[in-house]
Image (cartoon, rainbow, N blue to C red):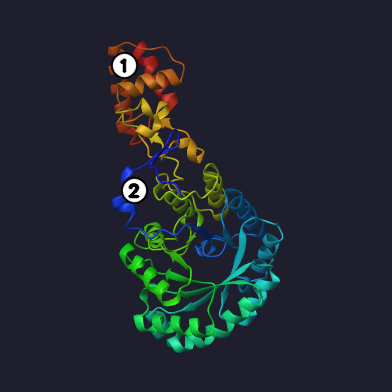
Amino acid sequence: MRETHFKDGQWWVSPYNFIPEVREKLLLPPKVQIHDATLRDGEQTPGVVFSIDDKIAIAQKMDEIGVDRIEAGMPAVSPQDAQAIKEISKLGLKSKIFTFARALKQDIDMALECGADGVIIEVPIGYPKLVTQFGWTWETVFEKSRDVINYAREQGLYAVFFPYDTTRARASDLENLCKGIMNESPPDSIGIVDTMGCATPEAIKYMVGWVKEMTGLPIEIHTHNDFGMGVATELAAVTAGAEVVHSCGNGLGERTGNAALEELVLGLELLYGYEMGYKLDKLPELGDLLAERSNIPIARNKPILGSGNFIRESGIGIQYVMHDPMVMFGTHPALTGRQGEVVLGKKSGKASINYKLEELNLDAVNDDQNAEILSRVKQAGIKKRGLVNDEEFIAIVNAVRG
């Protein structure tokens, strides 16, 4: 594990992330894997439908990046979903292929027919779900889970027990369920699922330690982003010992989406020092592919993938954007296959004008001309309530020069 905040020409984050006073309080596991659920949970985004070809292309790009596990879908949803998983399993990817399953033997059989390496076995445990939606008790959940977990493992599948809405479970229900499965049907790992995205990082850290103590199993964390904390809570889980984080590319998923794959990758790599081995410069390619196939555009200011992340309008420090970008940004744009850009508008300064003249191979101007050009650029930006493009800038320069 890397323990440095700086790598020349690549990133420069806070050194306080790595000081002993901070690190010694963390229970970081030696390795963290990413389990990406874009092809299942991401497709549950209202209005999103991935074709078989879409799913194959997305899986191949994720494999190229280095994603450890790909949840390729839920075979029981439709024959098309099952076929997509079969086709992905035949590709010989390095990524392990998982399916999503109810606590039914027939769903395990479907996973086997699709050639999956593992299965996520979902059952409800959140108290609102048990009482209102299903009318079950924890005993009902245990009885439905026990034989299915054992069957999946007997068939050679990696079995992840996934009691969803975990963060709204009654403590007694979760304790009894964990004890029951460990006595009669221990899975390979267990998930803590913040289905409604309503737990704080501190609560998630507590739950990771609590469930790990009860079961002794590897912990997987799956969160949603309802309070804008999906990535934060998953990283908090890692600091408490969780070994697997679940994600969706571009933060896709129901309602406000799931923890974003690209944010988790850079967070683990740069903020916590994990040497993930992922191809960071390929993340925008995956982002663009998902935006195209899901028909959901990436917000301009979205972390990691936003088109505006390395754009600078303010004139202060403009000279560093292209020549020494880590003065202005935490990562070098090239780390994720990007480049910096200087734009003009209301917030521009004299240095911005000089920079743009040089970029467009225009002759230099004197100080008075620079001041007049800058004044007109600002006025144009205010009038447009936006940026001044190159064509408009050239027209302003020509007008000032007379």
**Looking at this view, is 314 or 258 the one in front?**
258
Q: Earlier in the sequence, mark 2 or mark 1?
A: 2
The residue lying at 39 percent from left, 81 percent from top is 175
* Mark 2 residue crowding within 10 angstroms, few (<14) / some (14–19) / many (20+): some
Place residue 330 in its image quadrant.
Answer: top left
Place residue 51 in its image quadrant.
Answer: bottom right
Amino acid type of disc 1?
Answer: Asn
Which residue is label 2 attached to? 17
* x and y percentages locating residue 130 in the rendered image: 42, 83
**Looking at this view, is 191 or 382 the one in front?**
191
* x and y percentages locating residue 104 in the rendered image: 59, 81
The residue lying at 41 percent from left, 85 percent from top is 176
* x and y percentages locating residue 143 in the rendered image: 51, 88
Above or below: residue 144 compared with residue 5: below
Q: Quadrant of the C terminus?
A: top left
59 left or right, relative to 329 = right
**Looking at this view, is 263 or 79 the one in front?**
263
Query: Which one is closest to the eye, mark 2 or mark 1?
Result: 2
Q: Is residue 215 visible?
A: yes
- Element under label 2? helix
Asked if the residue under mark 1 is in contact with the one under mark 2, i.e. CB atoms within 8 Å, the reply is: no
Q: Is residue 136 visible?
A: no
The residue lying at 44 percent from left, 15 percent from top is 362
Which residue is label 1 attached to? 370
Above or below: residue 378 compared with residue 309: above
Amino acid type of disc 2?
Answer: Asn
